[in-house]
Image: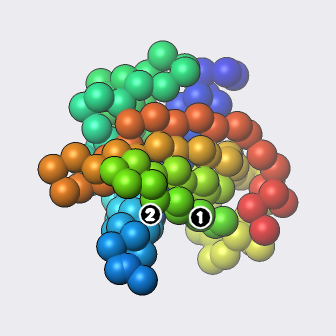
Amino acid sequence: MRGTNIKSAALGLLVVLALCSCGKKAADEELIRAAISRAAQAAEAKDIAGVVKLVSKDYRDDNGLDYNGIKGVVFGEFFRPGKIQVFVTGVTVEVQGKKALVTAKTALVRGRDVKSIKDILPENADASKFTLIFKKEDGDWKLVNASWESISVAGLL
């Protein structure tokens, strides 16, 4: 069961990747939010490259995953049959120079057609809360570290 939770959380993590002056700081926040949105869309399309391109080659997390580990998890999840829907809520972005701290909540629904978060049944979704660290690499924001915890679907609202 733990392996399934890690896989669902890792996929949710990648989805979270793809959403996220008064000048430059505000512009960077919007770039990160847009990336998170693109990652969610790529996950729903089962587009491995679209999700993984937002991850730094230097990615490492406390669960032992690196860039290749994340890529493997995404491949494994997308290989499974059934439609995937991703819902992302509560995104906060705090840019500090060339690094950014992002928090977000996600729900991953497989095999069901759900119109909104309010329609998700707890038994049909994996929900997680993520803390992400992005780093600016060659002008693009890339995920370098993530931690997550399982939450209830009600915790998404």
Q: Measuring 61% from the left and 46% from the top, which residue is drawn there?
A: 130
Amino acid type at mark 2: Cys
The x and y percentages for residue 42 are: 34, 59
Relative side of 49 to 83, left or right: left
Q: What colour scheme governs how the chains and residues are painted in the rendered image of this protein?
A: rainbow
Q: Measuring 78% from the left and 68% from the top, which residue is drawn there?
A: 157
Quarter of the image for residue 115 reads: bottom right
Q: Is disc 2 placed on a helix, strand or loop?
A: loop
Residue 74 drawn above or below residue 98:
above
Q: Measuring 84% from the left and 60% from the top, which residue is drawn there?
A: 154
Residue 75 drawn above or below residue 153:
above
Q: Residue furthest left?
A: 138
Callout 2: few (<14), some (14-19), or many (20+) C-alpha neighbours within 10 Å? many
Amino acid type at mark 1: Val
Q: Measuring 45% from the left and 54% from the top, which residue is drawn there?
A: 96
Q: Counting residues from the N terminus, which is met first, the one under dot 2 or under dot 1?
A: 2
Q: Residue furthest bottom?
A: 22
Relative side of 89 to 101, left or right: right
Q: Is disc 1 placed on a helix, strand or loop?
A: strand
Q: Nearer the viewer, residue 68 or 26?
A: 26
The x and y percentages for residue 36 are: 43, 61
The x and y percentages for residue 66 are: 37, 23
Residue 84 visible at all: no
Which residue in the structure is indicated by mark 2?
20
Relative side of 127 to 69, left or right: right
Residue 65 visible at all: yes
Q: Nearer the viewer, residue 102 or 104?
A: 102
Relative side of 28 to 111, left or right: left
Q: Tell me the quadrant of the picture where the N terminus can be found.
A: top right
Which residue in the structure is indicated by mark 1?
91
Q: For the residues marked 2 and 1, what is the alpha-carbon distance in whole angstroms?
A: 7 Å
Give yes or no for contact between labels 2 and 1 (Cβ–Cβ under 8 Å).
yes
